[in-house]
Structures are given as C-alpha cells and as structure tokens.
C-alpha cells in the first residue's frame, strides 16, 4: 500500500548541513553501484550511485536470478507493490537464465517512453538508492549521478531515486539548467519535465514523468535532494548561479583528466601526437572566481591523492570528487575479469588511459583504458557487429515529416546515413552502452554466439592508484581509498567528517 502524501514540505534529512570532504564519483554503468556507495556513505562521505541505464541493470540482475535477493528486498519496500510486481513478473527468473540465453530486451527510451519502460526506470533507480542507504545512520548521505546527454531517462531516474530518499543529485556532460526545477516539481508531486534536445527541431519538445500518473494520487513524502552541477569552467558556474531558477546547490569542477566523458576543449579541436585533444589554460576554471560565487564546490580530475585533497582545500573547495580509486576498489561493480586486467597492468606500471575524441557517440571525448581483448583495441572494435540496441545515447532528430526519429553514430552506418546523419560522425564511434554493461558482467550474449566486449573507462591520473597497489597488492577497499585520501587532513577536520 502506498504511503499517504503530505501537502507540506517534508523536513530535510540530517547530514546535508555537513558537507562531505570526499565525493565518490558516479561511474556508469553500475561501476558506482549500491555496494560501493554504501561503503563510502557509511564512512561519512558522499557515496554516489550511477543513474545511467538502471532499467537495463535491474532487468538483467533479475534475469540472472537476483543473487542474494538484494533487488527483490528493495522492491518489497517500493511504494507501489503492483508496479514492483509487474517488473518481477516480467524479468525475474528463479535460479537465473541459462548462460547461453540472451537477456530479454527492454523498452527503449524515447521522448515518450512506454509506461513499462518508465516503470522499469523508476523501480531500478529506487532499488539502487534504497540498497545504498539500507541500514546506514540517519545522517549518512547518498547521491545519484546522471548525464545531461542521456536526457530521455533523466526524469524517471530521478523520480525513482527521490522515492528512495536520495540526498544529492549530480549531473554533468552538458548544461543541466533545468534540473533544479525538475527536482522541485517532483518533490511537490507534480509533473516533472525537461526540454529535449532534438537535432534540427523547430518545435520545443519535452521529456516528462508524472508521479501521480505512475503511482496514483496517494504519493509518499518526497524530499528534494541537493543538486550539484558538474562544470569544467567558472563561466558556466557563473551562468548557472546568476538565475535563482536554475541555480544549483553547489558545483563539482571537473578538470580534463577525469574519467568517462569530459568537456571538449574550448575553441577549435586540436589533437596531439597521440591523437588526444589538446587542452589549454582556457579549459581550466579560475578557482578564485569559483570561490567568489559563494556556493560550495569540489574539485575533480587528478585530485585522487592526499596532496590533491590538500590542494583543493587550499583553493577554497570543500573537498574533492574521486572516481578511479573507487572504480578499482573491490567494492565497485567492475567484473572480476576486467578488474584483474587493470590491476595486473597497474602492478606492472603499464596501465594507460587514452582520451579518445571519437569513441563516444555524444561527440564528447571519452577516456578508454587500453586493455587486450577489449574494444579499446582497433581489431576488436572492427570485428564487433555494428549495432545499437540499448540506445541510451541515441540523438532525437526531426524528420522531414515533422515527426521525431532517433539515430546513434555507433549504429550501422547505412542506417545512420538514411536518418540524415553525416558519414564523418560515424568514424571511430563505439557502442558505449553495450561495452559498459559488459564491464559489470552483464554483457549481452547474442543468438549468433557473439558475446559483448568490455570497454573500460578510468581517469588519466593514476598517481593515487599506483600508491595503493603498493600498499594493497591484492586490491583495496573503498575505506582504504578514503583513509589514503585523508592522510593530510588536519586532525580537527578529520574529527568533523
């Protein structure tokens, strides 16, 4: 039975008045899973789950039999038992699917995703946040990270996370100007919407979620989480701060070495001798101007050492956001195979991460760890059947008839061209969606016998990881990474976190 909705704003949860020194970066797909976020949040910092493709993740976990029963335990607490049961009836396989059986497809995201797809997105993100917060102290804080470039899944993902009591929302890979209003609307139980980026569009279109349409009139109390916008330069932070309607509660200032997607260099794209984008002074935020804005901010991108934390604090930041140290920890969602590859290379001093300007269908540079037998190698990438079936990075575009179509630069080239795409946009593009699912051991097994290849992303700064592998040759936990990062914090500050 759903809980009664209150017309009064719920009291904000404790914990947010004390800003965490360390934000564990949100890394998709499910590398920043609930186990990792729970460990970090339980240690007094901000644990973050990835909100990308959680509809696919929960569907595949359930098809694999939900080992340990964790997702079913979370779904038992979902405000709409009927919705949770529909998801279970559709995807749960007792004992798990046969290993040579493909995963069932799920509804694709569109500007008007089918109700079954909306429900799967809401339930998946609810379960991930609920599990991250399960059993923690009342003042422990958990966040969710989404991408501006994955717009079509954002409203349902954030609604599901808010139903589970998420404390922070973080978003980058674009300009997240509409997220503050989306969060306010959802907290009030109202329809939440964001504008859709439609290539060639002449009519303004929206992506929305209707809380009461999905759960009924009796909604549980929903608290608005704090919103941290991930920015690369102070000019964007100033723009977002200027207008109260789009103003976030704080910023994460992400430098070019950060993992995953990063902002392209400002101005004309230039590549170095390795074929990587060249960044300059224009691509670095002025930290004095960031401090002058007056909102809390954290530094990211090559701050994953005690010295990096001290440097960030001396520049006026509250702390740092770190991804790579946590991605490599035993608490992350990374599957044993790719983790072993990464750790072997780290021990041997041969781990390299390339900032590939072509890999992502979004057009944003994307960091790719160079590993044998993965899609980071040209021959492996070329041998992969070119397809787009998960489709999270599809771009909506306006067709000649005025309707909306969808295309992805990583789909079969002839299909992309038929939809009006440019040939040059397809060169080197990789299917991130399927590769990232394979990273967590949930790659698709196709009927023709093809098993999806992994495609691992990390940050390019490995200094902290190289220290930890010496201290913990067999691997480290998230709490080991946290202890390392805090080694130069004053004792008085340690006592407050």
Image: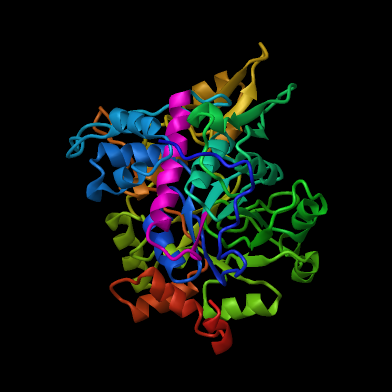
Q: Is residue 440 placed above or below 353 in the rendered structure? A: above
| Residues in magenta, as a range | 115-143
Q: Nearer the viewer, residue 96 or 142?
A: 142
Task: Inspect the magenta stretch and tell me whether residue 128 lies in it.
Answer: yes
The image shows residue 23 at horizontal and vertical percentages of 54, 65
Left or right placement of residue 324 versus residue 399 in this view: left
The image shows residue 407 at horizontal and vertical percentages of 55, 27
The image shows residue 186 at horizontal and vertical percentages of 61, 40
Q: Quadrant of residue 334?
A: bottom left
Q: Nearer the viewer, residue 401 or 461?
A: 401
Residue 151 in view of the camera: yes
Q: Quadrant of residue 307?
A: bottom right
Task: Inspect the magenta stretch and tell me whether residue 44 lies in it.
Answer: no
The image shows residue 38 at horizontal and vertical percentages of 41, 61
At 69% from the left and 57% from the top, the residue drawn is 249
Left or right placement of residue 406 versus residue 446 in this view: right
Q: Is residue 394 placed above or below 414 in the rendered structure? A: below
At 67% from the left and 65% from the top, the residue drawn is 297
Left or right placement of residue 126 versus residue 231 in this view: left
**Residue at far bottom of view:** 491
At 37% from the left and 58% from the top, the residue drawn is 35
Q: Nearer the viewer, residue 215 or 325?
A: 215
At 58% from the left and 52% from the top, the residue drawn is 169
Q: Is residue 465 placed above or below 202 in the rendered structure? A: below
Q: Is residue 361 placed above or below 201 in the rendered structure? A: below
Magenta residues: mostly which secondary structure? helix
Q: Nearer the viewer, residue 131 or 78?
A: 78
Label count reads 0
């Amino acid at each position: 039975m759903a809980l009664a909705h209150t017309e009064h704003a719920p009291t904000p949860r404790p914990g947010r008045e004390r800003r965490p020194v360390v934000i564990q970066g949100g890394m998709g797909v499910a590398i920043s899973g609930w186990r990792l976020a729970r460990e970090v949040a339980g240690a007094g910092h901000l644990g973050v789950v990835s909100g990308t493709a959680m509809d696919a993740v929960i569907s595949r976990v359930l098809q694999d039999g939900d080992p340990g029963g964790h997702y079913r335990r979370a779904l038992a607490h979902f405000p709409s038992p009927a919705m949770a049961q529909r998801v279970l009836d559709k995807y749960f396989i007792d004992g798990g699917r046969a290993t040579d059986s493909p995963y069932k497809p799920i509804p694709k995201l569109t500007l008007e995703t089918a109700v079954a797809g909306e429900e799967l997105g809401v339930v998946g993100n609810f379960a991930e946040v609920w599990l991250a917060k399960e059993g923690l102290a009342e003042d422990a804080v958990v966040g969710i990270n989404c991408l501006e470039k994955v717009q079509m899944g954002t409203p349902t993902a954030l609604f599901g996370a808010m139903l589970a009591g998420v404390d922070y929302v973080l978003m980058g890979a674009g300009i997240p100007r509409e997220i503050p209003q989306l969060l306010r609307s959802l907290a009030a139980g109202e329809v939440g919407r964001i504008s859709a980026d439609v290539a060639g569009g002449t009519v303004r279109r929206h992506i929305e979620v209707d809380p009461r349409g999905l759960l009924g009139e009796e909604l549980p109390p929903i608290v608005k989480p704090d919103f941290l916008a991930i920015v690369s330069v102070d000019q964007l932070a100033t723009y977002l701060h200027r207008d109260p309607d789009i103003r976030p509660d704080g910023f994460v200032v992400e430098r070019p070495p950060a993992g995953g997607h990063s902002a392209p260099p400002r101005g004309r794209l230039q590549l170095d001798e390795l074929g990587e984008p060249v960044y300059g002074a224009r691509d670095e935020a002025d930290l004095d101007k960031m401090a002058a804005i007056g909102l809390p901010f954290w530094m990211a991108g090559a701050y994953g050492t005690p010295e990096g934390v001290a440097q960030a604090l001396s520049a006026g930041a509250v702390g740092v956001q770190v991804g790579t140290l946590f991605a490599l920890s035993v608490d992350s969602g990374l599957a044993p195979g790719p983790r072993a590859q990464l750790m072997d290379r780290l021990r041997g001093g041969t781990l390299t991460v390339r900032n590939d300007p072509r890999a992502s269908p979004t057009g944003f540079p994307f960091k790719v760890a160079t590993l044998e037998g993965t899609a980071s190698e040209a021959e492996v990438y070329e041998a992969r059947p070119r397809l787009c079936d998960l489709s999270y990075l599809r771009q909506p575009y306006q067709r000649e008839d005025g309707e909306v179509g969808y295309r992805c630069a990583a789909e079969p080239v002839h299909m992309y061209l038929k939809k009006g795409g440019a040939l040059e946009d397809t060169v080197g593009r990789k299917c991130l969606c399927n590769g990232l699912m394979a990273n967590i051991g949930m790659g698709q097994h196709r009927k023709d016998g093809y098993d999806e290849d992994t495609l691992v992303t990390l940050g390019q700064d490995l200094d902290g990881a190289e220290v930890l592998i010496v201290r913990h040759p067999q691997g480290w936990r998230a709490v080991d990474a946290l202890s390392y990062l805090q080694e130069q914090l004053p004792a008085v500050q340690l006592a407050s976190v």
